[in-house]
Structures are given as C-alpha cells and as structure tokens.
C-alpha cells in the first residue's frame, strides 16, 4: 500500500512539474542579428540597418575595423596600446593580457574603501523609482516581446513599468595619500559594484604610487536596478539630460563627503566620470550637460544608441543623436518651446555637431563583437553599438575634441580582458595635464 502511494505521488509530482514547465513561457533571449522586418536594402529609406562588412558567423556579428563605415584608425601590433597621451583612433587586439598595474604589489600604499547605502526614500530627484515587471528568471522579458508605436520603430511601448523603490550601495575609495581636510580630485563611477571594476582600487594604488595619476577619490555608485527601457537604471543612464548629474551633485556627493570624511574639489578639471555600457553613455552625458562640473570622461562600450525611455519626441533617437540624426522619416528637428513641439532653428542635432566644442577629454573603447540589435522587436537603425562608437569618433574628430578611441579586435560588450588590459593607460590618459603633487 505504501509503495503504491509513493509511486502515485511521484507520478503526480512529475505531472505537475511538467505542466508548470509547459505553462512557463520560454525566455526570449537577446537577438544579436538583424531583427525581423528591418530595412537593410534602401539606405535612403527610414530606419536603415547597414550590414556591409559584418560577419554573421558569430553572434553578435564580427565587424571589420577597416570597413569604410568606420573612421580611419591606426592599427597597432597585437598586445600593444597607443603611446601615452596619443589622441585619435586606434585598433588593438586580438590578444588582451592584464596590465601589470592591475595586480597588487608589495610596498605600495593601499587605499581604503568605505560603503554606505542610499534608498529612493532618501532621494528627491529619483523618488519614486521605476520597476518593470518582467517574467521571473527571464531578463528584460517584457521589453523583448513588446511593440513599437505605429510608423515609428524607434518608439518602444513599455506597459510593464511602474513606480517602485530602489536601494543602492555607494563605495568610496580613499587613497592612502589623501590628506584629511584637503580638497581632492575624484572620479564618479557608474554601475558601481560591477565585476568589471574589480581591479580599480589596486590600479589606483599603483598609479598613484607611480605618480601617473593624482591621489583621487573613486566613488562607485550602484545603479537603480534592472536594465534598458522602463527600468530605473535605464531612466538614470540612457536619458540624454542633466538629471543624473544633478542627482550625483545634490544627493550623492554630500553624503560621500560626510560618510567618508573627505572634501571633494569643485574644480571641473579635477572631476572625472566613468562607466560601462549605459553608465558609459551617462558618464559622457554628465560632462556634456555640465562641463562646468566635469571635464574628464572614461567609458567602456558606451551605449550611444537609442535607449532613452520614456520616448522624448524632441530627441527621438536618444544618445544616438549625439553623433547622428534620428534614423526615421526625414523631417525637421523638433524641440519643446513654450510647451509646444516645434522645429528647431538652427537644427539641434546631431548634438555634438550642432554645439560649440566643450572642454571634455574623452577616452573609450568598443569591441568588434559589441552588441548588435539585441532586442528582436526594435529594427530602428540605431542599435549597433560598434557603429555608434565609431560614429562618435568621427564627430569628435570633426569638432576638435581631445579623445582616444580604441576599436578592439576579439572583444565583446564591456569586454573584461580588454578592461584589464587598458584600465591603467586609460586612467593615465584621462588625467593628463592635471597636476600631481
């Protein structure tokens, strides 16, 4: 009797398990290919996706850095980096060994890290936060299956996002050389806590000891949660506005000074921003909208694509419009004027092209296998990360910016081996010209 009941129970459990698995929809994974319904044939038509020179045997496709779609660049011997201070476009790879400065060394003074937590209840700017209802275990599920507005493939409709609560950790690195009471230069780091930054403190210890960068405070700020359209992280990082910079200035930095017992410089030449992916775009945006606060920017695979949400009709392409016009139907550039959407005069985008050159020093890299249309429902012509980074280099050069762009062979999005290879030289490049005591 007992044996029969055990068999029956086991059968029922198996049936319930199979039924539950059948009821659970399969996760829609990242696309990394041309989305269905995309325009890949008519360059003059809206939302064109150029596939010239892309190798689709890999996912994401591998791009040829020598393609005519990208600005000309100096190709360096494998394993080498540009000379210190060099500006312009460079091709590195395919080998990426960690730089020796990322490894702890005996006798080098080590900084300390202090941490504290900030919640949306303590914020004015981001209270309430945003939460998007995704299927449990399926990253970005609700935006992987959503739709776009009629006749506008760049306008994603997100119905699963709603007000919510966020909590984030802020880690403050203080170098051993910091003199209490003195004003220190600092770097604000987006996506704080990411494994990509595991070598940051050690690298700063070594570079400061070698007097290649000033003794600086490093402030890692955790993001608000989730990713992309409809999330708090996307709201903070992908918006082309000065809101996130104000959040840092008004709500984070005073707490850093209080909790870490430091004084932060008000000199924009002594302030840097840094980030990866969308927080890399945010790092540039902070300096773009507030060059009186930040002059130095460092980014790994910055998301200079159309990720801004909520959709802004006056900047329909989000960060894509830093370097290029909206990919939709030709028409006037639009701005909000006295509460009304009107054509801008003179044209306002691309933003970098239309504005006077700002005092921004920018280092960044993009991989030859960086993201390519990860969302299968957005064939908008503005979601090729590699192309967006190359187009940024083009307009930065045209406007006379001090920048260094690395096109990296054998590198994916926010490529960890490349970060370990380039982080020390990138920090040194970004801080060039700042006095070192």
Image (cartoon, rainbow, N blue to C red):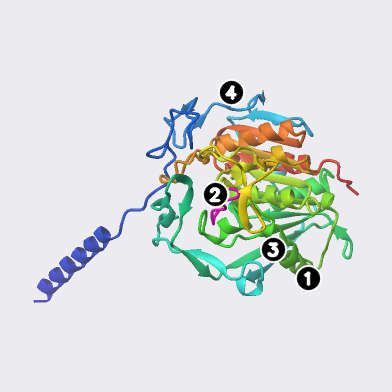
Is residue 411 inside the magenta stretch? no
The alpha-carbon separation of the residues under discs 1 and 2 comes to 34 Å
Q: Is residue 194 left or right of residue 138?
A: right
Tell me the mark number nearer the camera, choosing from 1 and 2: 2
**Badge 1: residue crowd in 10 Å (few <14, some 14–19, many ≥20):** few
The answer to whether the residues at label 1 and label 2 have Cβ atoms under 8 Å apart is: no
Q: Position of residue 200 (x, y in %)?
A: 69, 50
For the record, the magenta segment spans 309-315
Is residue 313 inside the magenta stretch? yes
Which comes before the other along the chain, label 3 or label 4? 4
195 vs 190, nearest the viewer: 190
Against 182, residue 106 (above or below) is above
Q: Residue at x 55, y 42 (%)?
A: 413
Which comes before the other along the chain, label 1 or label 4? 4
Which comes before the other along the chain, label 2 or label 3? 3
Q: Is residue 347 left or right of residue 182?
A: left
The alpha-carbon separation of the residues under discs 1 and 4 comes to 50 Å
Q: Which residue is under mark 4?
A: 66
The alpha-carbon separation of the residues under discs 2 and 4 comes to 27 Å
210 vs 325, nearest the viewer: 325
Q: Position of residue 330 (x, y in %)?
A: 54, 37
Tell me the mark number nearer the camera, choosing from 2 and 4: 2
Q: Position of residue 175 (x, y in %)?
A: 79, 57
Q: Which residue is under mark 2?
A: 307
Q: Which residue is under mark 3?
A: 247
Q: Which residue is under mark 1?
A: 258
**Can residue 302 be seen here?**
no
The alpha-carbon separation of the residues under discs 2 and 3 comes to 20 Å
Tell me the mark number nearer the camera, choosing from 1 and 4: 4
66 vs 83, nearest the viewer: 66
């Amino acid at each position: 009797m007992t044996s029969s009941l055990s068999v029956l129970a086991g059968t029922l459990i198996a049936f319930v398990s199979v039924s539950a698995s059948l009821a659970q929809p399969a996760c829609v994974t990242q696309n990394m290919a041309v989305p269905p319904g995309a325009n890949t044939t008519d360059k003059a038509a809206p939302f064109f996706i150029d596939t010239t020179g892309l190798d689709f045997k890999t996912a994401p496709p591998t791009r040829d850095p020598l393609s005519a779609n990208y600005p000309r660049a100096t190709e360096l011997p494998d394993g080498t980096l540009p000379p210190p201070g060099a500006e312009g476009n460079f091709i590195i790879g395919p080998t990426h060994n960690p730089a020796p400065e990322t490894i702890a060394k005996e006798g080098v003074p080590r900084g300390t890290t202090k941490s504290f937590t900030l919640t949306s209840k303590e914020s004015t700017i981001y209270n309430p936060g945003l939460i998007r209802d995704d299927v449990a275990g399926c990253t970005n599920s609700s935006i992987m299956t959503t739709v776009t507005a009629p006749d506008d493939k760049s306008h994603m409709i997100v119905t699963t996002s709603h007000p919510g609560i966020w909590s984030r950790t802020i880690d403050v690195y203080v170098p051993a050389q910091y003199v209490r009471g003195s004003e220190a230069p600092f770097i604000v780091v987006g996506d704080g806590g990411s494994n990509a930054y595991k070598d940051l403190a050690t690298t700063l210890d070594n570079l400061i000891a070698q007097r290649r960068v000033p003794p600086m405070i490093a402030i890692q700020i955790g993001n608000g949660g989730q990713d992309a359209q409809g999330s708090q992280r996307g709201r903070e990082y992908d918006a082309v506005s000065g809101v996130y910079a104000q959040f840092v200035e008004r709500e984070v930095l005073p707490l850093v000074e209080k909790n870490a017992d430091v004084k932060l410089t008000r000199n924009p030449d002594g302030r840097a921003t840094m980030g990866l992916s969308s927080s890399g775009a945010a790092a540039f945006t902070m300096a773009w909208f507030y060059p009186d606060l930040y002059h130095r920017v460092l980014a790994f695979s910055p998301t200079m694509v159309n990720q801004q949400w909520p959709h802004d009709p006056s900047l329909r392409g989000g960060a894509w419009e830093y370097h290029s016009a909206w990919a939709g139907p030709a028409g006037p550039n639009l701005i909000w004027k006295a509460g009304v959407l009107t054509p801008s005069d003179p044209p306002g985008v691309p933003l970098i092209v239309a504005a006077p050159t700002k005092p921004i020093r920018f280092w960044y890299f993009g991989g030859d296998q960086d993201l390519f249309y990860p969302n299968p429902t957005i064939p908008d012509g503005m979601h090729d990360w590699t192309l967006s980074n190359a187009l940024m280099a083009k307009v930065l050069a045209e406007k006379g910016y001090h920048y260094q762009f690395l096109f990296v062979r054998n590198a994916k999005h926010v490529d960890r081996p490349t970060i370990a290879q380039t982080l020390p030289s990138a920090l040194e490049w970004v801080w060039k010209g700042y006095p070192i005591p």
